Image (cartoon, rainbow, N blue to C red):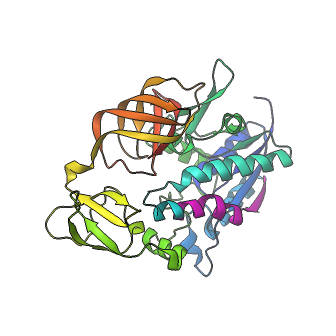
Amino acid sequence: MRKQRVLVAMSGGVDSAVAAALLVEAGHEVIGVTMHLWDYGDASESAGSGRCCGPVDVRDARRAAAALGIRHYVLDFKASFRDAVVGPFVEEYRSGRTPIPCVACNRTMKFEALVARAAEVGAGFVATGHYVRRRDGRDGRPRLLRAIDRRKDQTYFLFNLHPSQIARALFPVGGLTKEEVRAQARAFGLPVAEKAESQEICFIPDGNTGSFLARELGSSAPGPGEIVDEAGDVLGEHAGIHRFTVGQRRGLGLSGGPWYVVQLDAARNRVVVGPAPALRRETFKAVGVHWIAGRPPRTARVSVKIRHAGPEAEALLRFLSEESAEVTLAAPARAVAPGQAAVFYRGDLLLGGGWIA
């Protein structure tokens, strides 16, 4: 690739810092940007550490940029982030679904807002530290492939990117393992080479989703309701369906069992529970299906992931419309949760994905 001006999304972690370093080494003009997405208020610096937008991470991104001798800017996207990511996240829980905020953040923040900002400053590409590989197909359309390091692969979170966004994206660390990325960071002398990874939702620094939702929803939070079995018999009471997700076992406060959440009935404000076998499903519907790999077929045999960290399953995909499909698994899967993503693959190629209905 000829030398370009590239905007690099620097989260303050080692992956994005190495992505920037590799592009500098290749001779590109690199501009580092860190998105300020969430206001931690009176929280200490340590409370926001490792959360993509905490004060420690902004500082670390700035230090990494300085070590590379590149310009670095902090962009205030708090209002956009609340509208595009946090608001829908809260509403999904209110409706009895389990959302994935990282998918919305990647599309609207990193690959929509940043691509627009890149165009404003004359940058041809936006680069990130995602563990993903990009390759152009024979039809000229860009494709996404799983990372070399399958343990770190993040294609699951990028299934709904538009081809025009992928065409402007670079993923410099997608061909490296995590160990190789850290070794590169040490070789470049980056101050974040040994920084620990974050696994939490960036706008919930204490990891307590229930308390966060209660604060956000306030008086509009779902109130107490019944916990029932699959026959409709009342077994107990819950404090709000937004505090539960399909597959959950703890926090039910029921005798007997063991009981698992098998359904959240928002219309009747009920948590439906059952034994472990009741969690298994062989068929489900995916809506809002986005197909990256060319034109979607009527049917396709694919492998599917219904959780980022979960196992992969073989499945038959049958399109019901351009944006909905029936997924029939070769073997029943446990805890297929509405609101989560079903992401489809053929080998290493990311085909697309949709939302479990």
Query: Which residue shows up at 71% across the image and 48% down it?
Result: 112
Q: Is residue 330 visible?
A: yes
Query: Which residue shows up at 68% across the image and 56% down it?
Result: 64
**Whole-percent x, y for residue 219 in the image:** 51, 80
Image quarter where the N terminus lies is: top right
**Residue 71, quarter of picture:** bottom right
Name the dominant secondary structure of the magenta segment. Answer: helix
Q: Does the magenta stretch include residue 251?
A: no
The furthest residue to the left = 256
Q: In this view, does 41 lie to the left or right of 288?
A: right
The magenta-colored residue range is 70-90
- The answer to whether residue 260 is above or below residue 280 is below
In the image, 335 versus 221, the foreground residue is 221
- The answer to whether residue 85 is above or below residue 28 is below
In the image, 260 versus 185, the foreground residue is 260
- The answer to whether residue 337 is above or below residue 170 is below
In the image, 155 versus 61, the foreground residue is 155
- The answer to whether residue 134 is above or below residue 39 is above
**Residue 271, quarter of picture:** bottom left
The furthest residue to the top = 138
**Whole-percent x, y for residue 279 in the image:** 27, 50
In the image, 199 versus 219, the foreground residue is 219
Q: Is residue 328 left or right of residue 124?
A: left
Q: How many marks?
A: 0
Q: Can residue 152 be seen in this view?
A: no
**Whole-percent x, y for residue 200 in the image:** 48, 61
**Whole-percent x, y for residue 133 in the image:** 58, 34
